Image: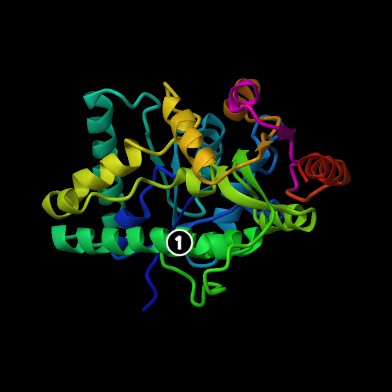
Amino acid sequence: MTASVILYTCPFVPAEWILAHGLSPHRFLPSPRRESGVFAGVGEGVCPFARAAVETACTEPGAAALVASTTCDQMRRAAEFGEAYDRLPVFLMHVPSSWESAGAHRYYRGELARLGRFLRELGGREPTKDRLAEVMEEMDAARRALLDARPGMTSSEFAVAVAAYYRGGVLPPGLPDRGGEVLNGVPLAVVGSPFFEGQAEVFELIERQGGRVALDATTSGEGSWPRPFNRRRLREDPFDELADAYFGSIPDAFRRPNSLLYQWLRRELQTRGIRGIIFRRYVWCDTWHAEAQRMKEWCGMPMLILEPEDDARLHARSISRIEAFMEVLR
């Protein structure tokens, strides 16, 4: 029997917690072409990404629930429309923006416990300590395997593999294996707003222009992954270790202070020899809009600021700007 599918887009929702409850986590990239009727009669004021996320969730076959979060005000508001529409259950997880206090960590653990009760109402079962630790080890190993395989994968292959991993928390079969060969191309980082469905198109364009996305630091990429789990703490108290690995380490731009983002970026940009940054910000995303100029001054390397269209396609202007940017870097 197939486990009930729990949909989410927020990186602070641990897939391990859902999987340990016997349900199937699916972190998805929204499709701007889904129509469910949730927003019928609603005019301007809901961002296209948040709208597409709720539309996609409400039209996804077999979906049992949508888990949204307060990391984005627009997503919170869109989730309220989805809940009122009553197509599928919606759980709103409150994630504090401040993260340095013990009280904020306790609050996040309380939200995980509340999410657990919601999952059990949907037919999930309360996980044992050993089961949670087992799931955490499996998913930690899958993330490590993806990163280990990355040097021999094209940017688009890696994007497809990550998307597949998000659909259930397990590695897709047959990761590309080029015998230790490291692919050529100018190493770039893509930073900023999450992708819609079809993100591989952007990476393929970069590859055709002689580049390689060596770091996907968008909200839908590896910049939204938790730190590796501590093996000793995982066995002693897996729930506490899970909460700390997610809430205490994910370097999201919404955090206050957002020092984790720049600490993580500095380390990864140096480690991977990044030579340029493509910074993506949707015009309606205040969080990433506020980071653009600061990051341009901070990074000390060429940076292209892109404002993607609402329909997720690469339009002529963006294509031309990426081609010009790659010409400078080659």
Q: Is residue 134 visible?
A: yes
Q: Nearer the viewer, residue 197 or 65?
A: 197
Is 180 situated above or below 221?
Answer: below
Does residue 79 show up magenta in the picture? Answer: no
Q: Which residue is at a point 61% across and 43% down the rendered structure image?
A: 189
Q: Nearer the viewer, residue 14 or 120?
A: 14
Amino acid type, callout 1? Asp
* 140 lies left or right of 273: left
Q: Which residue is at a point 79% across and 40% down the rendered structure image?
A: 325
Q: Residues within 10 Å of mark 1 (few under 14, many from 20)?
A: few
User: Which element is circle 1 on?
Assistant: helix
Q: Which residues are magenta?
A: 295-311
Q: Which residue is at a point 54% across and 33% down the rendered structure image?
A: 77
Is 229 situated above or below 274?
Answer: below
Q: Position of residue 172 (x, y in %)?
A: 49, 71
The quarter holding residue 136 reads: bottom left
Q: Position of residue 2 (x, y in %)?
A: 39, 75
Q: Nearer the viewer, residue 71 or 86?
A: 71
Is 109 situated above or below 299?
Answer: below
Q: Which residue corresponds to mark 1?
A: 148
Q: Position of residue 206 (x, y in %)?
A: 74, 52
Q: Position of residue 4 (x, y in %)?
A: 39, 66
